[in-house]
Amino acid sequence: MVYEHELISTIESALNKDYQIDREVPMIDKFIDIVAISKNPNEKEIIAIEVKIKNWKRAIQQAITYRLCADKVYVAIWHEFRHRVDENVLDYFGIGLMEVNGTTQIVKTARQSDKIHPAIRENIIGYVKGLE
């Protein structure tokens, strides 16, 4: 049996070279599993990731909200359940897909969000950067 925190650790390992990462970042009345902010001072890219073992529908419901603060939003799913994900739903909302199995692989690249709310985004940046 695999646990969500194991997937989160795997994803963090894949991203920590290029991104400052934080877990369980508060956003309105939700918590984003992983927020990754580019370490490159010339970029301000924010990636939000909702991690689930198999409940991809619930992950998408949560990920849709994250489009208010992140440039790109992903659902990360355990590899054994990736085949269940309806990629048409991901396409509709512009959400990307990561598959996790000891490593992290981007299966579908997220589109740039066109729903970003500046104040919510700044709150996320302040929360993550405040941990430095």
Image (cartoon, grey):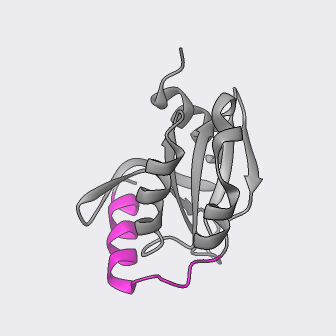
For the point 40% across and 68% down, the residue is 65
117 to the left or right of 9? left
- Give the overall secondary structure of the magenta segment: helix
Compared to residue 131, the image places residue 27 above or below, namely below
Q: Work out whether residue 17 can be spotted.
A: no
Residue 124 in the magenta stretch? The answer is: yes
On whether residue 123 falls in the magenta region, the answer is: yes
Compare residues 44 and 60 and report the one nearer the observer.
60
- In this rendering, the count of numbered labels is 0
Residue 44 in sight: yes
Image quadrant where residue 118 sits: bottom left
Q: Position of residue 95 (x, y in %)?
A: 60, 64
Q: Residue at x 48, y 83 (%)?
A: 115
**47 versus 81 height, above or below:** below
Residue 82: image location, x then y, percent = 68, 39
Look at 63% across and 62% down and name the residue there.
Answer: 90
- The residue furthest left is 29
Give the left or right position of residue 39, taking residue 132 as reference.
Answer: right
Judge whether 93 appears above or below 104 on screen.
Answer: below
On the picture, is 12 further left or further right than 28? right
Q: Position of residue 39 (x, y in %)?
A: 60, 62
Magenta region: 112-130
Quadrant of image for the C terminus: bottom left
Q: Position of residue 55 (x, y in %)?
A: 49, 40
